[in-house]
Image (cartoon, helix red, strand yellow):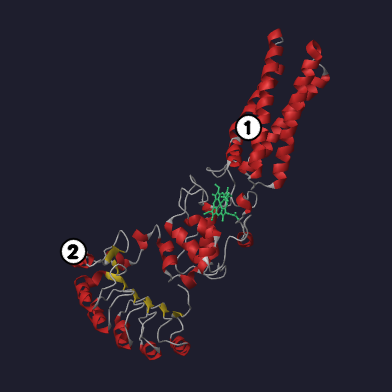
Amino acid sequence: MIINFLGHLHPVFVHLPIGFLAIAYVIQYFLKSSTEKSRLIDFVLAAGIVSSLLAAFFGWMLSLSGGYEENLLDWHRYTAIAVCIVSIALLGYKWYKKEEYKTPYYHAGFHLMMLSLLLAGHFGGEMTHGEGYLFSAATDTETGVVVEKREKEKLTAASTVSVYDGIVEPVLAQKCMQCHNEKKKKGDFQMHTIEALMKGGKNGKAIVAGDPDHSEFIRRILLDKGDEKHMPPKGKSQLTKPELDILSWWVLHDVSTAQSVKEVSSNDTIRKFLSDGEMKSSGPAALDTIAPADASGIAALKKINVAVVPLSSSTHFLELNMVNAPSFGDKDALLLQKISPQVMWLVLVDTKITDAGLEPLKSCTNITRLNLKNTAITNASISLIGQFNKLEYLNIVGTKIDDAGLLNLTPAPTLKKIFCWRSGVTTNGVMAFQQKYPNIEIDFGEKK
Ligand code: HEC
């Protein structure tokens, strides 16, 4: 902590020796001789020496925090030490020689000091701003680091580029790589290649494929923004919510580099990311065309603790979530009829709903996600579920629906994914269903 703080003083102090020593040089070679001139040089040189010793000390503290390219760091370190030694020797020599100090040695020493100063400054600049900084016309405005910022391609749901190349890497390039790249490896962590990313940093692997909860990489970006370990650090451009979701999703899905955007475009996280920013112009056409829901209908639902949330700020379509209404039952389901056209996501997890209660919901024809997890729903509701012809996501985890029910389902052409573990469905049922509908993904795992 204290080392960190002292290290941060280096960039502040480093300008002092540069100023003092350069002024000493100017006085020596551009000012007319006088008795005052010699004393002025003494004074300015002494100030330059004190400040360069301080800057060197703070620089040493800064180097302990790591993350700099060793090669450049060495050059910067040695040339900076040279500045200290040569300037001390120069002043010592001048005092030792008293009035006769203007010898060729003295002048050689003065030039050598200036040369070391220029070099130390140059290597320091390369280190913080990236190599070639001096001669590059323009660099990243925020950090000065030249990061190859890949143009974010115009991604669409049909893009065949991989999720990693098309989405993940550009996000990392924009928000992380100015500190975690080939040259600059803060925390010994680099992200410029997938191999470096998987290798991790000074605390070992930062990504556990398939397990975001145990991935330092994800933990850091989820930390509170005020937390010292939060990434990107305070004051830097932060991840947006869709970017954050994408990174978690990618880690959860085994950090694949092969999967194309197209293959996973039906996934909500991916879709949200793709539509982020252009939601208004090219979002699903139907989204803006629905009228506002009946206010009394919403009020009645809210009264029994149903969360009624618009799917986005620009639509009247709703998500209904019964997470705070565990006693929600068949009778309550009737309340949905008033707002049935607006219901798009319906989450009935852990409620008391039964087949009889689901029946009146057939008027909710715009449902795209139906989550019936841990309810008493049985095969009797299968034909009703088949009538939701915009359904994309169906969760029957922990219900009584079995193989016969699943195989009786006439899925909507839009259906992409069914979650069905801990239900009556068996592997045999899943296999038979997959044969009929190879494009529908079935999640039978124990995740979540
Ligand atoms: C402004 C510079 C900067 C940016 C931008 C930045 N980091 Fe860091 N990162 C650091 C520093 C400094 C450390 C080392 C200190 C620490 O551990 O907090 C670090 C450490 C880490 C570590 C720990 C590595 C280890 O093994 O200890 C992870 C993981 C990490 N960063 C992830 C990220 C991610 C993900 C992003 C982008 C979303 C990001 N960083 C953006 C400066 C940055």
Q: Quarter-wise, where is residue 377 in the image?
A: bottom left
As helix, strand or loop, the secondary structure at mark 1 comes to: loop
Q: Quadrant of the N terminus?
A: top right
Residue in the image at 46% along x and 69% along y? 158
| Residue 136 shows in the view | no
Q: Residue at x 66, y 42 (%)?
A: 63
- Pick the front one: 250 or 411: 250
Around disc 2, counting alpha carbons within 10 Å, would you say few (fewer than 14), some (14 to 19), or many (20 or more)? few
Residue positioned most to the bottom: 404
Callout 1 amino acid: Val
* Left or right, residue 388 beside residue 255: left
Three-letter amino acid code of the residue under disc 2: Ala
Task: Determine whether 315 is above or below 430 in the image.
Answer: above
Q: Distance of mark 2 from mark 1, alpha carbons? A: 65 Å
Question: Residue 22 location in percent, x, y?
Answer: 67, 24
Q: Position of residue 371 (x, y in %)?
A: 35, 75
Label 1 packing within 10 angstroms: few (<14), some (14-19), many (20+): many
- The quarter of the picture where residue 354 lies is bottom left
Count the marks. 2
Q: Which residue is mark 1?
A: 14
Asked whether, in this view, residue 243 is left or right of residue 89, the answer is left
- For the C terminus, give its image quadrant: bottom left
User: Can residue 346 be seen by looking at this rendering?
Assistant: yes
- The numbered dot on residue 208 is none
Q: Nearer the viewer, residue 146 or 34?
A: 34
Return the disc, 2 or 1, that comes first in the chain's sequence: 1
Task: Please give the residue where the numbered disc 2 appears in the rendered image.
Answer: 295
| Residue positioned 67% across, 36% down in the render | 122
Where is residue 379? Give x, y as percent.
Answer: 33, 88
- Residue 180 on image: x %, y %: 59, 52
